Image (cartoon, helix red, strand yellow):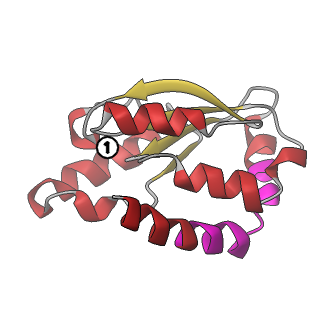
Amino acid sequence: MEDFYALASVDYRHLAEAENWKSWFEERQDQAGSRPLELLDVACGAGKFPAALLNYAALGNASIKPVAYSNIDTSSFSIKEARKVFSAPFEPNREYPVKLQDRDCFWGSFDIVWAINALYDVPVSELSESLERFNKANS
């Protein structure tokens, strides 16, 4: 797993540097108004992507409220590891130690839903249902 994370961390750094995430989050905050953003990280792993955003995307000085960061992953250990990387503007929120396809998210529960380097692990027979739930969480 360490080899995977070492390689993935390089990808996450490139992704963090490739987009103007500060502006991206500020636009979503404008849409949310005065309430904090709600984010769901599908198959969060050990939190390497939010760590890359915190290290390389200048989110610390973004004009946004704290982001309520929820994690879903089949590994409780990964969820616990991901929680350790959070700092402003990310704040730990809900945790779901289940597969996405086993969690019925409520319509519009989250402002942002992402699955970074994650959907490859969903069996083809469950992909349609997983994507439906993914979209449902952010509708």
- Residue 58 located left or right of residue 71: right
Q: Is residue 13 magenta?
A: yes
Looking at the rendered structure, the secondary structure element under dot 1 is: helix
Name the residue type under label 1.
Arg
Residue 17 in sight in this render: yes
Q: Position of residue 123 (x, y in %)?
A: 14, 59
Residue at 25% across, 49% down = 130
Indicate the quadrant where residue 75 lies.
top left
Which residue is label 1 attached to? Answer: 133
Label 1: few (<14), some (14–19) or many (≥20) C-alpha neighbours in 10 Å: many
Q: Position of residue 47 (x, y in %)?
A: 52, 47
Residue 24 in sight in this render: no
Point out the residue furthest to the left here: 125
Residue at 69% across, 75% down = 18
Indicate the quadrant where residue 37 lies.
top right
**Quadrant where the image shows the N terminus:** bottom left
Q: Position of residue 80 (x, y in %)?
A: 45, 31
Q: State how many labels appear.
A: 1
Indicate the quadrant where residue 79 lies.
top left
Residue at 27% across, 38% down = 74
Vertical comparison of 40 with 109: above or below: below
Boundaries of the magenta span: 11-27
Q: Main secondary structure of the magenta part?
A: helix
Q: Nearer the viewer, residue 10 or 20?
A: 10
Vertical comparison of 65 with 41: above or below: above
Q: Position of residue 113 (x, y in %)?
A: 50, 47
Residue at 41% across, 48% down = 45
Vertical comparison of 59 with 90: above or below: below
Q: Nearer the viewer, residue 23 or 32?
A: 23
Q: Nearer the viewer, residue 116 or 1?
A: 1
- Residue 74 located left or right of residue 114: left
